[in-house]
Amino acid sequence: MTTGLQLALLGGGLFAAGIALIVWHLIPAQPDLADVLRRNSPEGVKQQAAADAAISTDAGFAERLGVWALRRFPVAVWGRTPTKELALLQISLHRYFGEKVVFALVGLLFPPLVSYFLIVSGVHLPVAVPVLGSLGLAAGLFFLPDLNARDDARKARKEFARALGAYCDLVALERLGGAGARQAMEMAAEIGDSWVFRRVGEELSRSRWNGKAPWDALNALSDELGLPELAELADVMRLSKEGSQVYNQLRARSAGLRAATLSEELSTANAASERLSIPIGLLAVMFVIIMITPSLLNLMGGL
């Protein structure tokens, strides 16, 4: 059972932690130069505008919590942020950090609740068990959004490469019909209705208004999202600026993307078949055992 000494130690620890947090809040902060430059960069200003919009609209609890956490804690607390994955999935930074805080709070509160129900049921655990469990589970769940973002981004990149092959074919057909480079790229983006075509179309429309060449815009998008296939398409379309006929290059790029996608799908199917061979083999062994068991029992009974 929890003794008075343990309660006193727990209360003293909480009191000392509160005093430490107050002192830490009152100490003048030493700003990180990299953090300051990031906040004042165009990307940082865009993120701040998105955070302000999240507060002014009916945003969820996780997004509001993420805005609060971003303003209260330095960037170094969060570790490495999967920036390209979040940009590909179009997940705002404050929503991502809000999910991390929510998951950490769930991990922090779950073991004490379980310990409380166990105590009510008559099972008493040492104080160290829920404390260590809370810290370990909170640390583990804190990194769960990172794993989810990387896994979803890996699937999105596969889908992007698959759709980009069709986009290359459409651009090649538009060029064959006599359309200019920008016109062919924009008209091809308007044909498809998937998120890949919409994302490319948005970037091309933005480049038209800011005066950037469409291949430079696609190169920038490739760097932002981590999509080397898009950079290769931009390099091919840059040749059209010099008057080169890029129809054959576009068709070859499309064929290469389809071949790479097919090879990856075959590898995935082969891996799945290999995993299925183990339970099938076990079922075959069990079937043989069932078939020969009566004969073995008769033979042993005759002896």
Image: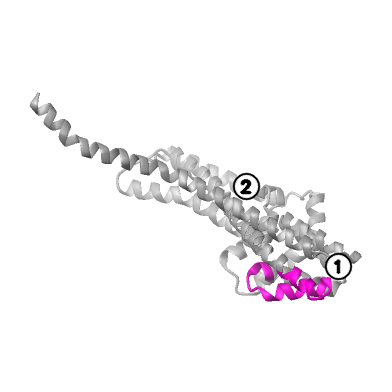
Q: Position of residue 66 (x, y in %)?
A: 63, 60
Would you say 165 lies left or right of 123 here? right
Please tell me whether residue 175 belongs to the stretch shown in magenta.
yes
Q: Position of residue 71 (x, y in %)?
A: 70, 59
List the residue tagged with mark 1.
213
Which quarter shows the N terminus?
A: top left
User: Considering the numbered disc 2 on the image, is that residue within a helix, a strand or a loop?
Assistant: helix
Q: Which residues are magenta?
A: 170-197
The residue at the far right in this view is 242
Q: Residues within 10 Å of mark 1 (few under 14, many from 20)?
A: some
Would you say 93 lies left or right of 278 here? right
State the image quarter where residue 206 is shown: bottom right
In three-dimensional space, the C-alpha distance between marks 2 and 1, rounded to whole angstroms, equals 57 Å
Which residue occupies 50% across, 54% down? 106
Asked if residue 237 is positioned above or below residue 32 in the image, the reply reads below
Which residue occupies 79% across, 48% down? 30
Would you say 245 lies left or right of 278 here? right
Nearest the eye: 111 or 209: 209
Counting residues from the N terminus, which is met first, the one under dot 2 or under dot 1? 2
Q: Position of residue 181 (x, y in %)?
A: 83, 71
Nearest the eye: 9 or 125: 125
Which color mode does the image show? one colour
What's the residue type where badge 2 is placed? Ile
Q: Position of residue 264 (x, y in %)?
A: 59, 51
User: Considering the numbered disc 1 on the image, is that residue within a helix, a strand or a loop?
Assistant: loop
Asked if residue 51 is positioned above or below residue 1 in the image, the reply reads below
Which quarter shows the C terminus?
A: top left
Tag 2 and tag 1, C-beta contact below 8 Å: no
Q: Magenta part mainly helix, strand or loop?
A: helix
Q: Which labelled disc corresponds to residue 19?
A: 2
Please tell me whether residue 186 belongs to the stretch shown in magenta.
yes
Indicate which label's residue lies in the foreground, 2 or 1.
Answer: 1
